[in-house]
Amino acid sequence: MSDSFAKQPTSLPPGAKAPGKDDEIIERRTLRDYYIILRERLWIALPLALTVALGLVYYQSRETPMYRSTATMHFDKSVTVLRQDSKVYNPDVENEVMLNTYIKMIGSETLRNQVRASLTPEEQKTLLKPFVKDLPPGATPPSVDVAMASPSVQSTRNNFIIEISVAHRDRDAAALLTNRYVDQFIQMLLNKVGTSNDEALVFLKKRAADLQQQAQDSDKNLADFVRNNDMITYDTSTNVVSARLMSANTDLQRARMEHRTIQDQLALIERYQGEKRNLLEINFIAGYGSIPDLRKQLEGLQRDQTLLAERYLERHPLMIKSASAIAVVQEQLDTAINLAIADLKTSLERSATIEQKQQAEYDAQEKELLHLRDLSVPYKVLADKKEADHKNFVEINDRLAQIVNDKYLESVPVSRLDSAHPSPEPYSPNLSSIVKTAVGIGVLVFFGVAVGLSFVDDRIKSAWDVETFIGANLLGIIPDLSGIKDEEKYRLVLGDQQGAGVEPFLAIYSAVKIHSKLDFPKSILITSTIPGEGKTLVSCNLAGSFARHGRASLLIDCDLRRPMLHRHYNKDNETGLIKWFENGASTEGDLLANPHLGITSVGENLFLLTSGGRSKSPTKLLESPAFAQLLERFKQHFELVVIDSPPMGAVTDALLIAERVDEVIYVCRFNRAYRKHIRLYIKALRSGKNEVLGLVLNGLSPRRIEYYSNYRYYRSYKKYYGSQS
């Protein structure tokens, strides 16, 4: 009775969240999930997609046939021509902007009117022929404007070739209009070309003289500016001053460093003097002038005095002579030290003077550089003006050099490459293009409808729905058992039976053991969302699975409003929970022998406690302390108590029972309950501190099991063991 269950971590698909979280679910599906979605809604999306595609083909194939003719023109690099108004007119195509200008001219209303005016009566009849043919008898023919089609102009990238196309109902009319647009466009360019050259030459020469004078004035102004500001050139002067500034900065930093070093030496000497320390410990003092020699001389006299002191008394003439010599040398040493300090102070004053001088030099060079920078703007203005004036002068001279005599005045920079010819076949309707478009739209409709319906349809369908959206463990999948008799369906796992219907419940038994964290004895509640999802079937066979494996199990029918367990085991419903509660609800004595409970054996290690009748308001019983005590007493007699409860979507009885049990198993039937409702009820169970072991998905056909889950063993199992009768 004390086997423990180890809680094993559940591997969820990518994007799944841990059970118990109430965050927003982010749906991340695999290609397999979308394949299932398409297969499930094939007969909805496919007819709709075919209807849309075939309708599109039928509608577009009935369009009026249209013919297109195309002509090409090439724009050349031509010479400059002049107009009579003394203005230079240059029709050259020198860039994309100019080419686009000509393209706009071809599509202008002016050219359209020019083309319409050039049409002869016979040509107008050719344009109106397809329109007149479709008119009813006696109707007035349309005007030429109706039959006039506007040209479509397209340029080719990186060259100066354009295509002019015109679409029309008649093939001859399309070619006629295309060629006429080309002819009238060339004529429009010819009309813009001037016929007088002399006045233009006078204008250009006068303009050249003016630009030459401007260029000379710009040169003089720039030279005066440079001279007045004492510059060689702006860049040269700036470089010279910058170099001086850098040199001054280097000298200034060197002077500052030297001044700071002397200050540090004097500060060190003052500190030693204040602390009464030996100044000879300072390197500068110790190495200054004659101090090293005096120190050596003093040290030698002191050694001699020490030797004499070992032989003579203090008043001995030799001792007196030695002391006098030491005093003289010591006085000379002190004088040298004072001289070193005085020399250091003099050096400090000198370094301060040098630093001030270098600072002044640096400031002067910096001021000069700032002055040059202030002059940069007016200098650049003058220099740019000089360059622009020279450039304009060169351009006007080039323009004068390009002018030729009168024979070139009639030329335009365009030539016809290919003329338009009648097209043998209409370009519209294009059956191939229509079919491709229809197929593409049909595919989009097919996928859009199928995937769209999957987002609208919120019913539980797959292991993905359970583990990813609801966020719970999938304990197992039960196939559709409609082919098994009702009297056998609820006793599948009793005894040693084998078959395709038995194995799913044994798999659920294994999953419950894996995911349970509690030791025996314990109680498990089986519930669902709505009636008819198979919770009673799961309750019976789960209890039978534990009993089959040697666990003493009690199956309790707590669906007091609509009890069903007694029918499945061919028992009467005269005794049970309701009778026990009406007769005092005693939990004393031997419960197995209690006549009001009427617990009966329905198989090896499996016992049944029926409801004992029906009740319209069972909450009084379920909320009573006696009911909770009864469940605890049952754990003293049985290792497992399995409770079959009403669906949570119908009544609240399951929540009341859940407060009394240890673990909960939720049953869902394929394509019945909605995911949002299941998630809501599981959240309610978890908020009551219940351990929800997971969900059981019920009622899938073998084909759906294969497509909606990874439980592919079912078919193989059925082939291996044979169908259960």
Image (tube, grey):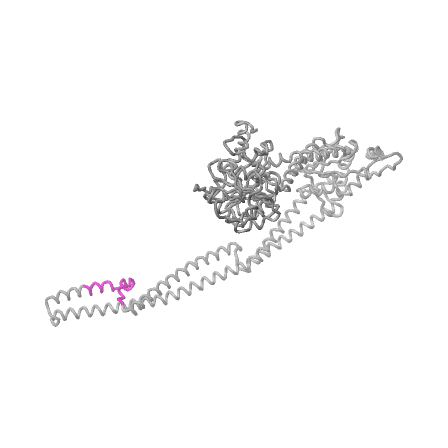
307 to 631, vertically: above or below = below
Residue 269 horizontal/vertical position (percent): 31, 67
Q: Is residue 422 left or right of residue 462?
A: right
User: Seen from this angle, which residue lies furthest left?
Assistant: 311
Residue 633 horizontal/vertical position (percent): 48, 46
379 to 123, vertically: above or below = below
Residue 389 horizontal/vertical position (percent): 63, 51
| Residue shown at the point (78%, 38%) measured from the top left | 149
User: Seen from this angle, which residue lies furthest right?
Assistant: 138
Is residue 569 at least partly visible in the picture? yes
Name the image quarter holding residue 266. Answer: bottom left
Query: Is 292 part of what is drawn in magenta?
Result: yes
Front residue of 180/276: it is 276
Q: Is residue 354 left or right of residue 499?
A: left
Front residue of 621/115: it is 621
Front residue of 176/555: it is 555
Residue 226 horizontal/vertical position (percent): 55, 57
Q: Quadrant of the C terminus?
A: top right
| Residue shown at the point (22%, 64%) measured from the top left | 295
Front residue of 507/218: it is 507
338 to 454, vertically: above or below = below
489 to 560, vertically: above or below = above
Magenta stretch: give its range: 277-299
Is residue 467 at least partly visible in the picture? no
Q: Quadrant of the N terminus?
A: top left
